[in-house]
Amino acid sequence: MQGIIRLAALAAATALAGCASFSPDGGMGVVADITTRTTAKEVASVRSDDDAERVRAATRRLLARPLSADAAVQVALFNNKGLQADYHQLALSDADRVGASLPPNPTLSLMRISGDGALEAERQVAGDILALATLPLRSGIARERFHQAQLRAALATLRLAADVRRAQVRAVAANELVVLLVEAQSAAEATARLATRLGETGALNRLDQAREQVFYAETTAELAGARRMASSARERLIRLMGLWGDDLGFRLPERLPALPRRPLTQPFVETDAVGHRIDLQIARLELSALATSLQLTEATRFVTLLDLAGIDRKTIEPDGRVIRERGFDVQFQIPIFDGGEVRVRQEAETYNIAFNRLTERAVTVRSEARDAYRSYRAAYDIAGHYGREVLPLRQIISEEMQLRYSSMQVDIFALLLETRQRLASRRAAIDAKRDYFLAEAELSTAVNGGGGTTGEDTARQTASALAPSND
Amino acid sequence: MLSRRTLLGSAALAGASAVSGRVQAAAIPDAPVMDKAVMQPPLHPSAGPDYQPVVTLNGWSLPFRMNGDWKEFHLVAEPVTREFAPGMSAHLWGYNGQSPGPTIEAVEGDKIRIFVTNKLPEYTTVHWHGVILPCGMDGVGGLTQPHIQPGKTFVYEFEMKHAGTFMYHPHADEMVQMAMGMMGMIVVHPRAPVPPVDRDFVFVMATYRIEPGSYLPKVTEMTDFNMWTWNSRVFPGIDTLPVRLGDKVRIRIGNLTMTNHPIHLHGHKFKVTGTDGGWIPEVAQFPETTTDVPVGTVRVLDFIADNPGDWALHCHKSHHTMNAMGHDMRNLIGVSRKELARAVGKLSPDGMVMGNTGMAMGTMEMPAPDNTLPMMTGNGQFGPIEMGGMFTVVKVREGLARDDYRDPGPYQFPAGSVAYEVASAPEPPQRTGSAATQTRTQR
C-alpha cells in the first residue's frame, strides 16, 4: 500500500510537469515530411478560408496547363476531400493524445446529511491514483498512437498519390489510343471508300470489297470502345483529384512522356523498402505501443482499480458539538479469482500476434519490393524495345512499302495491310509505355508504401490485431 | 578499252597444275577483263584469217592469241557486278568481269583452244551451244567431262567446222548458273574474205528475278521474272544500234531465257538468215518485221537499213518492255486521282503522297526502293518513251563512219514529216447505247 501511494505521488508530480499541448500543425508536419521526401509534393490541410483560397489558386494554376502526372498528384493532394478527412482525423487524434496526457481530474464530493438536529457534512477529494500513477505510460502510448495516426495520414497521402499517378497514366494512354484509332479509322475509311469505288468501276469483286471494308467497320467499333475507356479513365482521375464543375475542362498531355534515358538502379531495393515502408513503420509502432501497454498491464496486474480519497468529515452532533474527522479511504479490487492472469495472457498473446504479423509483413515487403523492381525493369526494357527496335523497324517497313507502292511494285491495299500491322505495333508500344509508368508507380509504392488494395488490407489487419485490448 | 590483268596467283597455279599434262603453265594466255557495260568497238583480228568483226550490244569480244595454228582464249568464270541500267546493279556470275561473257569470235576452220578457269564458289563447265565438236569437248558435266572444280582451269580444244552464230553457257548446276547470268555468244565467221554485212550486232537474252531493293537474282524463279534483259541490260540502259543509211545490217540474237521472245523491228523488213543450226538457204527466207526467237535458239536477222530515222527494236510481249513491277495490282482505271490521293495520304501520312500524280507514269520519276529502276522510263525528243526491259532503238543515219558506233543523238526529222495535231477536229459521231459511257475512262 505504501508503494502505491509513493507511486501515485511521484506520478502526480511528473504528470503535472509534462502536461502535453496541441500540435501547432495538427500533426501535419510528419505527413508533409514523408510526402515531400517520397513524392516531392506539397500537402495542405485546409482549415481556414485562407488555406482554401491558396489551394484553389494553386489548383487553377496547375489545371491551366496540360496535366502531367506530377501536377495531377498535386491537385489531388490539395482537393481530394477524402484525404482532407484523413487529415482532420489526424487532428482528432492529436486531441486524443493531449487528452490522454493529462492527469485524471480529481473527484470532489460533498456530502451533507442532517436529521434530528444533527448535521453531518463530508467533503471528499478523490483521485484515481492508479490513473495518475500510470500517466507517463499512458501518455507514452497516446503519443505513439498519435504518431501512428500521422503515419496513417501519410500513408493515405502516398496511396492517393500513387492512385492518381496510375489514373493519369491510364487516362493519357487511353487518349493516345483514341488518337491512334482515329487516325486508323480515317485511313480505313478512305480505303473503304476506294474499295467501294473500285467495286463500281468493276475492279473489285464483292468478296474483296467486303475484305477491304471490314477493317473500317472493325476500327469504328474499336474506336468507340477506346473512347469509352478513355472517358472512364478520365472520370477516375477526376474523382481522385476531387474536381467538379468548372475544373473539369482540364487538358491531358497528348502522349505519355518519354522513357527515362536509363532505368533506376536499386540494388538495395529490399533494404530501402523495409526502411521506408510506412505500413511497416505503423506496424512497428503498433508493436511498441503494445509493448508499453503490456508493461502497464504488468504493473497493475494485482490492482486494477485503486481509488484514493482524502476524507475531511465534519459532524455536528445534535447537541451542537462539532466533531471533525480526517482520514483517507482507499478502495481496490483484488483479482482473487484470476490473479490478473487472464488480462496478462490476453496482452501477451496480442503482442505475439502483432509481432508475427509484423514479421510476416516485413517478409512480404521484401518480396514485393523485389517483385516490383523486376517488373519495373522488365517494363522498362519492353517499352524501350518497342521504342528502339519495333517502331523504327515499322518506320522502315512503312517507308519501303511507300516506295514499292510509288514504283508500282505493290497494290494500294498492300499499304492498307501494312498500315494495320503498323497500328498494331504502335498500340503495343503505347501499352508497353503505359505499363512502364504503372510499374514505376508500383515500384514507388513498394518501396515507400501506399500500394494497392492488397497491401492496404494487410496493414489494416495488422493494426486491428491490437485493437480489442487497447481501445 | 580493255583492262588486262594477270591471273591471280593461286588460282592460276592451281589451274596450271590441272592442265600440266598437256600445256605448260606459262603457256596459259592472259584472261582480259572488261570493267564497263558500254558497247565496245569491234575487235579487228590481229592474226589468223581476216573477218568483219561483230559488235556486241553493251559488250565486247574476247581477244585471242595465236599459238601455232591454235587460237587461244581464256575465260574466267567469276562473280561480277553488272549494271542493268544507270541506277541498278545486279550481283551476278559471269565471265571476265561481265555478264554475259565476252563474245568469242572465230573463223570457219579455226582450231580453237579455250582455257576455262573457275573462280566461282561451285563447280562449272562450259557447253558450246550449237557448235559441232567432239563429244568430249561438249562441256556437259558428268556426261562428257569431270566438273571444273573451284580454282581449277580446264582447256577445251576443237575445230570450228561451221560458220554461224552460237552460244556458250554452263552445263553444270545449269539452272542456278544461268539464272545467275552465266552465258555468252560465239560468232564463227565464214572463210569468204568479203565481209557479208556492214554492221553485225550480237546479243543474248536473259531474264532475272531481282526483288526491288535487292541485288541478287532469285535463282529458283521459273516464270515470274521482272528483268528482261539483252546482254544483261534493260532499257534505258541498252545501247542504241547506230547504222549508216543503206548499210547491210545483221542482228544476231540468242535466247537463254525460259520463254520465247517475238522480236520486232520498226521501219524495215528483215529476213531470218540463220539459226544456231547454221545459215538458212535463201529460198527458205521470208520477209517479216517480227520474228520469234524460241527458247534456247539463235536467230540472225538481215536487213538493209534503207529508212532513215529512230526505229524501235523490241520484244513484242508488252510486259517484256517493262522493268520491275508488281503483278498483283488492281486496276485503278476509273478511280479519280483525288480519291486515290486521299486514300494514300491517309495510309502513309509520313511518306510521300504520290496520289496527286495518280497513275500517270510518263515524266514523273517515282521514288523506288534502292537499286530499283522505274518500271517504264526513258525519254525521247517528244517526251517519255515509257518502256523498259527488252527495248532499244536502231538509228539509221546518213554518213556514219565505218566503225563508228557512237550514239548519233535524236533523229532530225525533215520538216513536216512528224505526225501532228489537227487544229479543228470534227466532232466524233454520237454513239448510242450505254457501252460508250461504261467504258469511258475517267482520269
Image: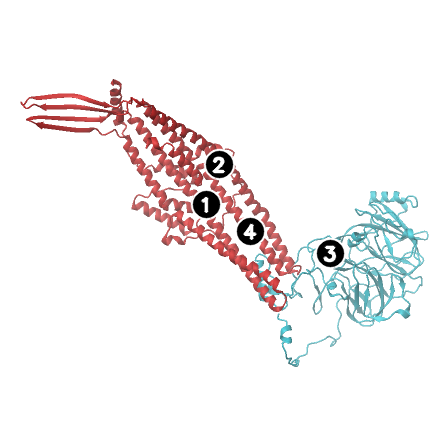
Chain colours: A red, B cyan
Relative placement, left or right, of A28 versus B314 is left
Badge 3 vs badge 1, beta-carbon distance below 8 Å: no
Judge depth for marks 3 and 2 and give the one in front. 2
Which amino acid, by three-letter code, is at mark 1?
Arg
User: The disc labelled 2 sits on which kind of residue?
Assistant: Glu
Tell me which label, 1 or 4, sits earlier in the chain: 1
User: Which residue matches tag 3?
Assistant: B209
**Cβ atoms at labels 4 and 3 below 8 Å apart:** no
Badge 3 amino acid: Arg
> Which element type, helix, strand or loop, lies under badge 4?
helix
Separation of marks 2 and 1 at Cα, in angstroms: 18 Å
Closest to the camera, between mark 2 and mark 4, is: 2
Chain letter of the residue beneath label 4 in the structure image? A
Q: Disc 4 marks which amino acid? A: Arg
Q: Which residue is the site of mark 2? A: A368
Give the residue number, with chain letter if any, for mark 4: A426
Residue at mark 1 to residue at mark 4: CA–CA distance? 21 Å
Quarter of the image for residue A132 reads top left
* Whole-percent x, y for residue A135 in the image: 28, 27
Q: Is residue B437 above or below residue A163?
A: below
